Image: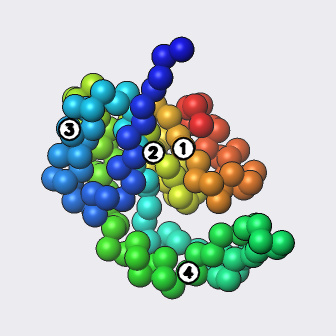
Amino acid sequence: MQKKLILEICQNHNGSSKLLKEMVHAASETGAKYVKIQDINSKELTKRLRFESGKIKNRKLLVIKRPYMSELNRLKKLDMKREFISNFVDYSIKYGLIPMVTPFTYNSFNRLKNQKVKAIKIASYDCSSVKFLEKFSKLKLPM
């Protein structure tokens, strides 16, 4: 069985295209096959009450705690420029990697639909969002 290493850049590029390019290049030197970023734009966040305090029952996490204001403040610093995803895709292809993206909002669909992204990774807290999954399945990419 052939193993496929996926390197997660996440938001560690801090919104910097220069740093992103360096990270993709470094990923290519590891033997990774895939490289992944997250498509997040703080202006697109919505307040979802179930994440404000989370939910634990019988010591089992049912809903992750991600309060809106703290997420907004954290993510504002990471907002990406419009061409960020296309730069990521270009860098990935240039260095022989397969680009993957984790979408976080419905607006990600419009940013991803005309890109050469090869796979989508759904965030764990969106795995039960049927409408979200249906929307992104229209990209006809592995998820």
Place of residue 73 in the rendered image (x, y in percent of width and height, measured from the top left): 41, 81
The tag earlier along the polypeptide, 2 or 3, is: 3
Q: Earlier in the sequence, mark 1 or mark 3?
A: 3
**Relative side of 136 to 63, left or right:** left
Q: CA distance from mark 2 to mark 3?
A: 17 Å
- For label 1, the residue is 121
Residue of label 4 = 68
Q: Which mark is residue 101?
A: 2
Please name whichever residue, 106 or 99, is drawn nearer the observer in this view of the structure: 99
| Crowdedness near tag 1: few (<14), some (14–19) or many (≥20) residues, C-alpha within 10 Å | some
Residue 132 is left or right of residue 55, and the answer is: left
Question: Residue at left 16%, top 53%?
Answer: 18
In the figure, 35 relative to 17: above or below? above
Answer with left or right where residue 67 lies relative to residue 39: right
Q: Residue furthest front?
A: 59
Front tag of 2 and 3 = 3
